[in-house]
Amino acid sequence: MKKRLAHGLKLMLVLSLVMSLLSACGAAPSVQDTYPLESVNGSGNSTSYVYRASDRTVPEVAQELSDQRQPDQISAENTERMFLVYQDEYYHLQQDPNKPEDTLVEVDSKEYVRQNYDSSFLQGYLTATLIGNLFDSFGGRGYGNYRGYTNKDNYKPSAGSYRAPTSNDKKLAPPITVDRKGTITRRGSDKDSSVGSGGGLFNRNKDQSKGTIDRNKSSGGLFDSPKKSYKKPKTRVGGGRIKRRR
């Protein structure tokens, strides 16, 4: 009975592990845990969230996201604009024209892309098959002329407009930023050395104590010189004769 129970528990653990792995496959990377939320548009199943990746180029952000989760499709490397597709979410990476050293990460739901984007614009970044499937209900083409957050003033979304995120928006997609600073405590040091604190990684803030060995003092220590307690052996000079056998 105990063997059957143990076997059943092992089987349940294996199944739960397989299910968790399957659920993780194809899931989109957690952008909200990495970059701060900057703007929001849409409602229901048609939503668009814009995050800011400071001091990151478009290819760098694309690589970071791809390392978290391999996308179903990714456009060719470009310093101004790239697309990553994850199931029902489209990641539109754009260089900020007002701050070129930053990248804007626009996360659009599939429905938002279908209702707002210009299909001819997407042809330069996505495959024809994906675009055809995306706009199949619209006769193979979209009705919007939207081209991304950086062009929202010239090519406005067909419904709604971008706005600063509210407290409720932040609850739905909380902008969590990680300082990524740690401390290293070394033995023999009275103060921690902090990563990113301005000094070296292994800086020490106090002089280390130094030991000395004095061989002139006989305190019974480990390194004391041995005492000269022995006497020099005496030697004596004598004479003798050597006889040969005949």
Image (cartoon, rainbow, N blue to C red):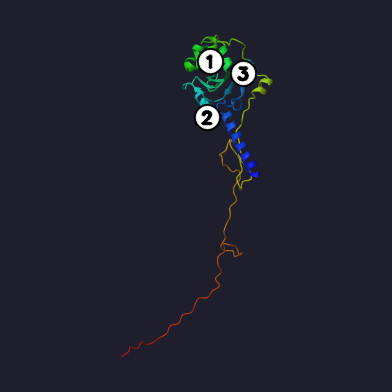
Q: Quadrant of the N terminus?
A: top right
Residue 149 bears which disc, if any?
Answer: none
Q: Residues within 10 Å of mark 1 (few under 14, many from 20)?
A: some
Q: In the rendered structure, which disc, 1 or 3, sits on the residue that comes first in sequence?
A: 3
Mark 1–mark 2 contact, CB under 8 Å? no
Residue type, numbered disc 1: Leu
Q: Is residue 94 above or below residue 67?
A: above
- Dot 1 corresponds to which residue? 134
Q: Residue at x 63, y 39 (%)?
A: 8
- Residue 152 appears anywhere in the view: no
Task: Tell me the distance, in whole angstroms, between the alpha carbons under discs 3 and 2.
Answer: 25 Å
- Dot 2 corresponds to which residue? 67
Q: Residue at x 59, y 31 (%)?
A: 19
Q: Is residue 23 above or below residue 118?
A: below
Residue type, numbered disc 2: Asp
- Residue 132 appears anywhere in the view: yes
Please name whichever residue, 239 or 135, is drawn nearer the observer in this view of the structure.
135
Query: Mark 3 or 2, which is nearer the eye?
Result: 2
Q: In the rendered structure, which disc, 3 or 2, sits on the residue that comes first in sequence?
A: 3
Q: Residues within 10 Å of mark 3 (few under 14, many from 20)?
A: some
Where's residue 225, x and y in %? 55, 65
Where's residue 89, x and y in %? 57, 20
Where's residue 36, x and y in %? 61, 24
Question: What SS does tag 2 mark?
Answer: helix
Residue 107 falls in image quadrant: top right
Number of numbered discs: 3
Task: Tell me the distance, in whole angstroms, between the alpha carbons under discs 1 and 2.
Answer: 25 Å
- Dot 3 corresponds to which residue? 39
Q: Residue at x 58, y 15 (%)?
A: 112
Please name whichever residue, 239 or 176, is drawn nearer the observer in this view of the structure.
176
